[in-house]
Image (cartoon, rainbow, N blue to C red):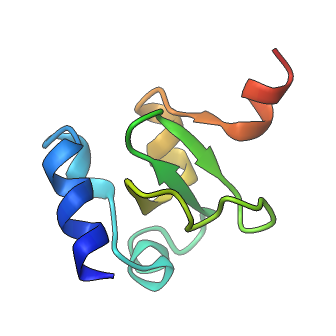
């Protein structure tokens, strides 16, 4: 897990890193009333816990859905619909 975090911080935008977390628990502490999603930092697409790629992409982090939306990230379901 530590290697994953180092990779993601090297490629992620430093401004965006402030809302990215290494675990869903830390993200949920940041936004207790929001949904925690997994954000692929390379593609700016996020996944819900019910999605197969939740927590699985190489360069990613747990984030609050509202933070992801306000940063212009998109849910995987929106990409599939295009």
Q: Is residue 59 left or right of residue 66?
A: left
Task: Say which quarter of the image contains residue 8.
Answer: bottom left
Residue at 38% over, 44% down: 41
Instruction: Describe residue 16's horizontal placement relative to residue 35 as left or right.
Output: left
Residue reaching furthest right?
81
Q: Residue at x 42, y 58 (%)?
A: 58
Residue 81 x/y as whole percent: 86, 22
Count how many numbered circles sit on residues in the image.
0
User: Which quarter of the figure is the N terminus placed in?
Assistant: bottom left
From the top left corner, tell me how far across and down residue 5 is, in percent: 26, 69
Name the quadrant of the C terminus.
Answer: top right
Q: Is residue 52 left or right of residue 34?
A: right
Q: At which x and y percent is residue 30?
A: 38, 71
In this rendering, the answer to whether 80 lies above or below 75 is: above
Q: Residue at x 25, y 43 (%)?
A: 16
Q: 25 above or below 6? A: below
Residue 27 figure quarter = bottom left
Which is more toward the observer, 20 or 51? 51
Foreground of the two, 51 or 31: 51
For this orientation, the residue located farthest to the top is 82
């Amino acid at each position: 897990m530590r290697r994953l975090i180092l990779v993601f911080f090297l490629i992620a935008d430093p401004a965006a890193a402030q809302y990215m977390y290494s675990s869903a628990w830390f993200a949920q502490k940041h936004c207790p009333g929001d949904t925690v999603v997994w954000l692929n930092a390379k593609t700016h697409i996020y996944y819900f816990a019910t999605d197969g790629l939740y927590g699985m992409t190489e360069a990613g982090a747990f984030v609050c859905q509202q933070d992801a939306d306000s940063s212009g990230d998109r849910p995987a379901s929106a990409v599939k619909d295009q």
